[in-house]
Amino acid sequence: MIKKFFPTHYLKSIYEIDIKALQEEGIKGIIFDIDNTLVPYDEAEPNDKIITFFGKLREAGFKITLVSNNTEDRVIKFNEKLKVFAIHKSKKPLTKSFKKALRLMDCQKEEAIIVGDQIFTDIYGGNKAGIKTILVVPVSDKDEWITKIKRGLEKKVISYYEKKQRNNNG
């Protein structure tokens, strides 16, 4: 039951993503959440480090889509410098936007991975869609009020996940 909330991978940040390992897994498309995955929810634009990282991903042959529950204005403004596919008001954890992202990137679900900071939207939605997931530590402690409420439950899921990982690896 609780495993539907477990990510495929758990990393400290997007910069720990192993590009070579993704290529070896046959990943061709990467779906990114924006808020607190890439930048704090109150930052309007990607920083230079993100722009450079997305450039490296593109050079490595990955297609990229932003999938956010945020507004059209927020997503369009954030995407101005990145120029990747973008979906706003995605209603995660519903799977419709993830499936749309796969179509935009011309990928099968086995060829994609979702990167996000929230278990109950990004990870659960990705798992329901049959897409591999990477959970990252939120880039900021600042959250919208509704997200703050969910973080306590997420900590329990993460703790249980990490305990299972240690037991499986040890």
Image (cartoon, helix red, strand yellow):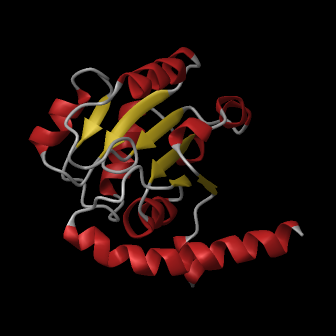
**Rendered position, 151 above or below 142:** below
Residue 153 x, y percent position in the rendering: 44, 81
Please give the name of the residue rendered at 57% of the width and 85% of the height, measured from the top-left corner: 1
Residue 28 x, y percent position in the rendering: 56, 31
**Residue 100's image quarter?**
top left
Q: Is 135 positioned to the left or the right of 145 in the image?
A: right
Q: In which quarter of the image is the C terminus?
A: bottom right
Residue 78 x, y percent position in the rendering: 22, 33
Q: How many marks?
A: 0
Q: In the depicted view, which residue is nearer to us: 57 or 103? A: 57
Please give the name of the residue rendered at 41% of the width and 62% of the height, measured from the top-left corner: 118
Q: Is residue 108 visible?
A: no
Q: In the depicted view, which residue is nearer to us: 38 or 82? A: 38
**Rendered position, 15 above or below 51:** below
**Residue 45's image quarter?**
top left
**Rendered position, 19 above or below 150:** above
Q: Is 16 positioned to the left or the right of 109 in the image?
A: right
Q: In the depicted view, which residue is nearer to us: 44 or 115? A: 44
Q: Is 131 positioned to the left or the right of 39 in the image?
A: right
Please give the name of the residue rendered at 61% of the width and 40% of the height, measured from the top-left corner: 16
